Structure formats: structure tokens, C-alpha cells
């Protein structure tokens, strides 16, 4: 089946640093990737949608300058949390879909902890 | 905008018994897709079952089946012969046709008890 690899799975860093999370589709071309944020015991909240070669579309309330999304190729999208602060600590999950619009395939998520 | 409601925050079931998780949604679309995802403690998102709105027949995947009532906008998940490994958060999700994102409900935490 389709595989989406997300890296790193867990990162701890100091407040003020920037953190990059990668999302790769390993065996299909991901024309669209989605980034979600999940707080403990809550549902997934869509942050942004990115189409290959285009600027990401952010959901209302998500800071574009804080969460930089790049989708430069059909197999890789990155989320960079800039100048991270403790309130950015969360679980971030990516998902990818090919042009057939089949169900999204999810990465295993990244636990981000900002000290 | 579409909304998905899961009215049961937590449920429990005895091993080998059957349990039904509820989900309702609101949409003005005529063509759409519905999903149930399982998220175990590992936090992986695992697709359990999907249903296309244009299909009247309820989807079934082994021990998992749905009761899709389009007019009532209801999409419940039935788990038969519950197993300890079914313990997880279950999310109901909606997707319009085309290249649109999933809209998730708040989830139901299911505990299977030995």
C-alpha cells in the first residue's frame, strides 16, 4: 500500500529555534499534501493544504509566517515552525494524496516539544 | 461548511462483543465520501472503512461495517467480535468530491475490556 514517511518522529528543542518536519510519499506522486495539528485528546485540525509547485493554502487562524510550508516536488513537503515557542508544542501529522483523489495516506506524525 | 459530529466521547465494550459508534454530518453536497479512521496509542492514522455517498450499499471490511443513512446524514460504525487491539480513538471524517481535505469529528475513545 501507499506509504508516507514523516521525519522526525519526535523533536525537542529550545524556544526561539526553527524546526523543519519532512513528509515524503515513498511510492506514489503526491500532488496534494495536507498538514494537521493535533492537541492531546483532541481531533486533527487542518492547518494547510499544499499542491505541488504552488503556494500553500492556510486555514483561518494559522499564521503563514510561523508555519512555512514548501511542496517543491511530487514526493516531498516540508513544514517549518519558525521561532518556535512552547505554545507550538503539539503533534503534527501530514497526509498525501495523488491525482486520483484516493483516500489520504497519513504519515506517522511528529511530536514537537519546545522547552 | 461541512461539520461532523461524534456524540460519544468515550465508549467501552467487552471483548468479543459488538459496539456501534455514532457519527452525523451536515452538508449540502450531493456527492461526497465518508470515512472512519482509527488512531491507536501509537497515534498512527489508520483507515478503517470508507463509503461513497452515491452507493446505497453499506461498506463492510471484515469485522467492521457501517450503517449509512444518507437522508438522515448518519454514518455509524459497527465493530463485531471486538478485540483488545481495537482499543483506540476513532474518528469519523467527511470529504467533498474532488481535491478537498478531510473534515474530522472530535473522535470517540473506545476501550475494549478483557
Image: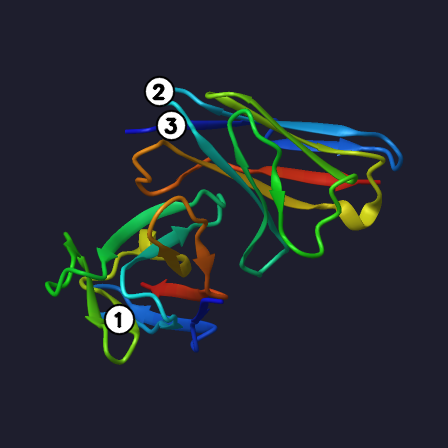
Labels 3 and 2: the sequence-earlier one: 3
Q: Nearer the viewer, residue B98 or B67?
A: B98
B110 in relation to A108, above or below = below
Left/right of residue A8 with respect to residue B52 in the rendered view: right
Q: Residues within 10 Å of mark 3 (few under 14, many from 20)?
A: some
Judge whether residue A99 can be spotted in this image: yes
Give the foreground label among 1 and 2. 2
Q: Position of residue B100 (x, y in %)?
A: 43, 48
- Model colouring: rainbow
> Which subunit holds the residue at mark 3?
A
Looking at this rendering, what residue extends furthest in the bottom direction? B72
Q: Which residue is mark 1?
A: B19
* Few, some or many residues within 10 Å of mark 2 (<14, 14–19, 20+): few
| Residue A13 numbered mark, or none | none
Q: Is residue B56 above or below residue B83?
A: below
The picture places residue A35, in percent across and down from the top left corner, at 57, 41
Residue B77 position within the rendered picture, expressed as x and y whole percent measured from the top left: 27, 66
Instruction: Please tell me the numbered disc located at residue A27.
Output: 2
Q: Position of residue A88 (x, y in %)?
A: 76, 46
Secondary structure beneath label 1:
strand
Residue depicted at 10% across the width and 63% down the height: B57
Task: Measure how far apart labels 3 and 1 are at the Cα level.
Answer: 30 Å
Q: Determine which residue is flagged by label 3.
A: A3
Q: What is the spatial separation of the Cα atoms under label 3 and label 2, in whole angstroms?
A: 6 Å
Looking at the rendered image, the quarter that the C terminus of chain A falls into is: top right
The residue tagged with tag 3: helix, strand or loop?
loop
Q: Look at discs 3 and 1 and give the one toward the viewer.
A: 3
Amino acid at each position: 500500500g501507499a506509504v508516507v514517511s514523516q521525519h522526525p518522529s519526535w523533536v525537542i528543542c529550545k524556544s526561539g529555534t526553527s524546526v523543519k518536519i519532512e513528509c515524503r510519499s515513498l511510492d506514489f506522486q503526491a500532488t496534494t499534501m495536507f498538514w494537521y495539528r493535533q492537541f492531546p485528546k483532541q481531533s486533527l485540525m487542518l492547518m494547510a493544504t499544499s499542491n505541488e509547485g504552488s503556494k500553500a493554502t492556510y486555514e483561518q487562524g494559522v499564521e503563514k509566517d510561523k508555519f512555512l510550508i514548501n511542496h517543491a516536488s511530487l514526493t516531498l513537503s516540508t513544514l517549518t515552525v519558525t521561532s518556535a515557542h512552547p505554545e507550538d508544542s503539539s503533534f503534527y501529522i501530514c497526509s498525501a494524496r495523488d491525482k486520483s483523489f484516493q483516500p489520504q495516506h497519513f504519515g506517522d506524525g511528529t511530536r514537537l516539544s519546545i522547552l | 461548511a461541512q461539520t461532523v459530529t461524534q456524540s460519544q466521547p468515550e465508549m467501552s465494550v467487552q471483548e468479543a462483543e459488538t459496539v456501534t459508534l455514532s457519527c452525523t454530518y451536515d452538508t449540502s453536497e450531493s456527492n461526497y465520501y465518508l470515512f472512519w479512521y482509527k488512531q491507536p496509542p501509537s497515534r498512527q492514522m489508520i483507515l478503517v472503512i470508507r463509503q461513497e455517498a452515491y452507493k446505497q450499499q453499506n461498506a463492510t471490511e471484515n469485522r467492521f461495517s457501517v450503517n449509512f443513512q444518507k437522508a438522515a446524514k448518519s454514518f455509524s460504525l459497527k465493530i463485531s467480535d471486538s478485540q483488545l487491539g481495537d482499543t483506540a480513538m476513532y474518528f469519523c471524517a467527511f470529504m467533498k468530491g474532488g481535491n478537498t481535505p478531510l473534515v474530522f469529528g472530535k473522535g470517540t475513545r473506545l476501550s475494549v475490556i478483557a
